[in-house]
């Protein structure tokens, strides 16, 4: 019996009318009538976890949660807070503050800062210790603005095979914002570095329950003073022209363009110059990758103790198809625009290519406005599928250093640096 | 009266034909605990002083599998982080769970007594490996 016949069947119609009147009488039009002899099929929500295979979804699978100053985002963990940005917020080059992903390491996350008392301290191995208030940062220094992608080292961790423990991010542990603030170099120069200085350490207001001296008590990151990225760093007091949300690091956050977010200290309050190497957990043990091409290794080599590690730093080139996202079937013959973003921590993306046969044949996409080397770059490409079927849309980007996204997976025990070519299946249906 | 009822029936029939011939309405439902509604957060009450204060961070409950060791998990793991750190993970091999719990003690200084550590490891291995994980 096809749909037309079913609608015309008198018995079926009576059933529909009966259900409708029942619904009206109960005053609950949309509620299921569970007294019916035959229950309608139970629909499914998203699964609550993925694995041991790879997460097949673009985002992680957690529920939505509303956190302060945020639209509903995907919950990974609630204490400390880890929230992922849903795919559709990446339609634009700049990610809205209220949708920007969140990742903290320790559970003592500030949610009140009194700017009367708060001072940014520049201390340690310097000629003159500084304590600068928020208004001094805004008024005494030349403001600089910079578009830069902030991406978690573990973005897309849920793709790895075998799976590794840690935040099971889909692709949404990233965002791009226009950061405005003071050049870090200007602050360091004002304080004056002593000649035996080695690195500069950053500490935020967050604290954990662990004993002093351990990684569970303080989250500390540092950069070597010889690292040229220091000249590009910004102590940002504004994000997309607004104050930073608390969960993204109000009052100020360090911006390290091209570097993974682990260095972008939130609620930055202590800038400490050291005349020794930084031996704390988050430099010596955490956030390290194998010293191999792409940070790739195997569980066997890790077990055999063969893997030498180095700190994660710049993020590799990546690109994403944002829409269509596969949530709608596309009628055959329709002109569709494929849209997405691309970025690299090694310099501007200058080529994005798309494929509708899973990566056999590639055509160049048109790049959107250039907001700077460290920003998301939007791209688009027209696409038309004349015949029904399943199409595997693949996208790959190349940056100005000539790095192109590979098609091989990556594996390391931390779950870092995933940048394999992404694919999205689109189903094209018969339109006649 | 019968004619009137028949007329109403025919009109309804033809309306139904005109309306639904092109579409089908599929019946189904979601279990209330699976897909629900999410309330919006209240707007903030800010005053023009120097204190920049946000709302508290929500702490939703976590569904852990009942069983031996659950109490130890809830007491000790919750000291530093919510137990959603467990349910968020993919099913992990027994050896990985053991290494994770040992890391909390040795690297992060959790200092959980040996018998409680063993109970926690056993609980995780009993309910959250590829062979055992159900929810």
Image: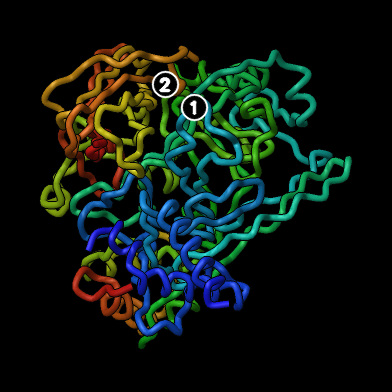
Q: Which quadrant: the C terminus of chain B? A: bottom left
Asked if marks 2 and 1 touch (Cβ < 8 Å), the reply is yes
Image location (x, y in percent) of residue A351 = 29, 14
Residue A299 vs A366, above or below: the answer is below
Which residue is tagged 2?
A: A378
Image location (x, y in percent) of residue A164 = 27, 54
Give the structural element (helix, strand or loop) at label 2. Answer: strand
Q: Can residue B98 be seen in this view?
A: yes
Residue B107 vs A244, above or below: the answer is below
- Could you say which is closer to the camera, residue A204 or residue A423? A423
Image location (x, y in percent) of residue A306 = 14, 45
A225 relative position to A292: left or right: right
Measured in 3D between alpha carbons, the distance from the residue under mark 2 to the one under mark 1, in whole angstroms, is: 7 Å
Q: Which of marks 2 and 1 is nearer the N terminus?
A: 1
- Could you say which is closer to the camera, residue A366 or residue A61? A366
Q: Can residue A290 be seen in this view?
A: no
- Could you say which is closer to the camera, residue A12 or residue A238? A12
Q: Which quadrant: the N terminus of chain B? A: bottom right
Residue A381 vs B119, above or below: the answer is above
Residue drawn at the location 37% of the way across and 62% of the way down: B26
For disc 1, the chain is A
Q: Residue furthest bottom?
A: B68
A63 relative position to A304: left or right: right
Give the structural element (helix, strand or loop) at label 1. Answer: loop
| Disc number for residue A127 | none
Residue drawn at the location 49% of the way across and 71% of the way down: B6
Question: How many tags in the picture?
Answer: 2
User: In the rendered image, which quarter is residue A44 located in?
Assistant: bottom left
Image location (x, y in percent) of residue A137 = 73, 24
For disc 2, the chain is A
Residue drawn at the location 32% of the way across and 24% of the way down: A335
Which residue is tagged 1?
A: A92
């Amino acid at each position: 019996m096809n749909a037309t016949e079913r609608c015309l069947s008198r018995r079926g119609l009576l059933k529909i009318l009966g259900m409708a009147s029942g619904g009206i009488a109960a005053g609950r039009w949309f509620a299921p009538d569970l007294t019916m002899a035959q229950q309608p099929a139970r629909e499914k929500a998203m699964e609550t976890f993925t694995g041991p295979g790879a997460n097949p979804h673009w985002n992680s699978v957690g529920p939505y949660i509303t956190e302060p100053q945020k639209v509903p985002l995907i919950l990974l963990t609630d204490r400390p807070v880890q929230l992922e940005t849903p795919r559709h917020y990446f339609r634009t080059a700049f990610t809205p503050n209220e949708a920007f992903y969140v990742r903290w390491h320790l559970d003592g996350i500030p949610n009140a800062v009194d700017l009367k008392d708060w001072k940014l301290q520049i201390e340690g191995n310097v000629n003159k210790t500084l304590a600068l208030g928020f208004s001094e940062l805004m008024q005494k220094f030349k403001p600089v603005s910079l578009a830069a992608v902030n991406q978690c080292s573990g973005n897309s961790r849920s793709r790895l095979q075998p799976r590794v423990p840690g935040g099971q991010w889909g692709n949404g542990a990233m965002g791009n914002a226009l950061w405005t603030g003071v050049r870090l170099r200007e602050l360091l120069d004002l304080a004056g570095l002593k000649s035996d200085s080695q690195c500069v350490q950053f500490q935020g207001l967050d604290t954990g329950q662990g004993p002093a001296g351990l990684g569970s008590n303080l989250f500390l990151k540092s950069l070597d003073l010889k690292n040229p990225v220091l000249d590009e760093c910004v102590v940002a007091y504004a994000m997309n022209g607004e104050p930073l949300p608390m969960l993204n690091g109000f009052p100020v956050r360090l911006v390290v363009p091209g570097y993974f977010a682990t260095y972008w200290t939130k609620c930055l309050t202590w800038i400490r110059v050291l005349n020794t190497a930084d031996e704390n957990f988050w430099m010596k043990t955490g956030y390290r990758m194998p010293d191999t091409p792409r940070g790739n290794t195997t569980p066997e080599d890790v077990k055999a103790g063969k893997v030498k590690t180095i700190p994660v730093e710049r993020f590799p080139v990546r690109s994403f198809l944002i829409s269509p996202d596969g949530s709608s079937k596309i009628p055959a013959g329709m002109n569709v625009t494929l849209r997405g973003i691309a970025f690299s921590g090694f310099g501007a993306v200058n080529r994005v290519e798309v494929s509708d046969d899973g990566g056999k044949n590639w055509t160049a996409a048109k790049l959107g406005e250039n907001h700077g080397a460290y920003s998301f770059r939007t791209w688009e490409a027209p696409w038309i599928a004349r015949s029904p079927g399943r199409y595997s849309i693949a996208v790959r980007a190349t940056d100005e250093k000539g790095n192109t996204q590979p098609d091989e997976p990556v594996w390391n025990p931390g779950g870092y640096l995933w940048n394999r070519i992404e694919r999205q299946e689109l189903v094209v249906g018969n339109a006649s | 009266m019968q004619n009137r009822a028949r007329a109403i029936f025919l009109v309804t029939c033809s309306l139904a034909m005109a309306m639904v011939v092109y579409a089908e309405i599929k019946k189904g439902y979601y279990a209330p605990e699976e897909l629900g509604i999410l309330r919006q957060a209240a707007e903030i009450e800010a005053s023009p002083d120097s204190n920049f204060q946000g709302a508290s961070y929500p702490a939703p409950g976590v569904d852990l599998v009942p069983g031996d060791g659950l109490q130890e998990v809830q007491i000790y793991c919750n000291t530093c982080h919510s137990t959603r750190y467990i349910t968020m993970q993919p099913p992990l091999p027994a050896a990985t769970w053991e290494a994770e719990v040992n890391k909390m003690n040795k690297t992060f200084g959790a200092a959980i007594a040996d018998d409680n550590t063993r109970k926690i490891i056993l609980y995780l291995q009993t309910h959250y490996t590829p062979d055992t994980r159900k929810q």
